[in-house]
Amino acid sequence: MQRLAPLAIAVTLSLPALGPAAAGCGPTDMNTLAGRASLAVEITIRTPGGQPAHGTGIIWNERGHIVTNDHVASVGDQHVVTLAGGERRAARVLARAPQHDLAVLAVDGPLPAPAPRKTTAALRAGESVLAVGNPFGRGMSVASGAVTGFGRDVITAPDRRLTGMIETTTPLSPGNSGGPLLTCRGEVVGINTAAVAQGPSGTPLGFAIPIDQAAAVVDRLLESSTVVTAASSPAERTERPGLGLYVVPNGQALVVHQVVPGSPAARAGAMPGDAIIEANGRLVSSPADLQALVHEAGTGTVAVLRIVRYGSQLDMAVRITPVVFSS
């Protein structure tokens, strides 16, 4: 079973002297938390070696968006989320921000309402917190701890340094990645991301991305990413033309982040990582450019995409058709 490295070990650049943990959450608080069990989902990912990896995600909105760590989303090519009631849905990577270790997954159909959020500025050192996650893929569990610091810098990979993290004594294990850090009242204050085996006093330390910091990144991802494909509601599936691509802007090109299996783009040979620079002879530098061209051309026509792959340009003909996701 593959473990996700950033939550297995991290190197902290600033460790505080640990203070006494708070008394913990009371029975009333735990009842409130139990009523919000739908705020997190289990994530199972098929890795290149065929073995499953595990992580956790936070229900971000009711429109089918789930937020997790990028090191969870990027570890494999097929993602399945399990909701609190046991329902399993196929998920796809909608957008990624590797430098912030955040990613957005999308599923078809509505999701339960997300949990309320609490800004980091309202947290206090010593305040009790809870981590909900899927450690080692064994199912959801809750771990408790206390806030011990703010604004911590953590290196989770040779090329990845996360700043402004919340530091806690909450014990985290591989599989907790991407899960919520909560107040005793069930408010999301962070996204659990990394852990050190021991602090200077021998106490394990966990690190979470503050939820307000994560929200700013996720909002930008949802604004800039687009699905050049059919919409997810049944009424729109037969009305909106599409290619079957997920694209995000990258300078003067659009980078393909995912190709919908069985879609026109998949049949044409499109691959994740392709950089689209032109469509039907027109420059495209934003998702809106490509979306507008697809809608103007309409269903049944052919869009010729000029892409850059491994430094070489090639033209790819993709027939515009309604695209329907299968879960």
Image (cartoon, rainbow, N blue to C red):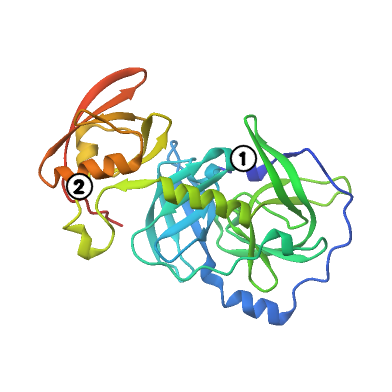
**Residue type at the position of mark 2:** His
Residue 7 to residue 188: above or below: above
The amino acid pointed to by label 1 is: Ala
The quadrant of the picture occupied by the N terminus is: top right
Visible in this render: residue 263? no
* SS assignment at label 1: helix
Q: Nearer the viewer, residue 221 or 293?
A: 293
Q: Determine the residue positioned at 22% across, 60% down.
A: 236
Instruction: Say which residue appears at 45% left-offset and 36% top-offset.
Output: 49
The image shows residue 99, relative to residue 113, as above or below, that is above
**Numbered tag placed on residue 295 in the rendering:** 2
Q: Measuring from the top left, give residue 64's x and y in whole percent.
A: 40, 61
Which circle, 2 or 1, is nearer the viewer?
2
| x then y, percent, for residue 140 | 57, 63
Residue 303 locus on image (x, y percent):
17, 35
Residue neighbourhood size for the residue with mark 2, other residues' Cα within 10 Å, grouped as few (<14), some (14–19), many (≥20): some
**Quadrant in the rendering for residue 288:** top left
Residue 322 coordinates in the image, percent (x, y): 18, 51
Query: Quadrant location of residue 112?
Result: bottom left
Instruction: Tell me if 279 is positioned left or right of 220 in this view.
Output: left
Per the image, the residue denoted by label 1 is 5
Q: Is residue 232 above or below residue 95?
A: below
Q: Nearer the viewer, residue 100 or 55?
A: 100
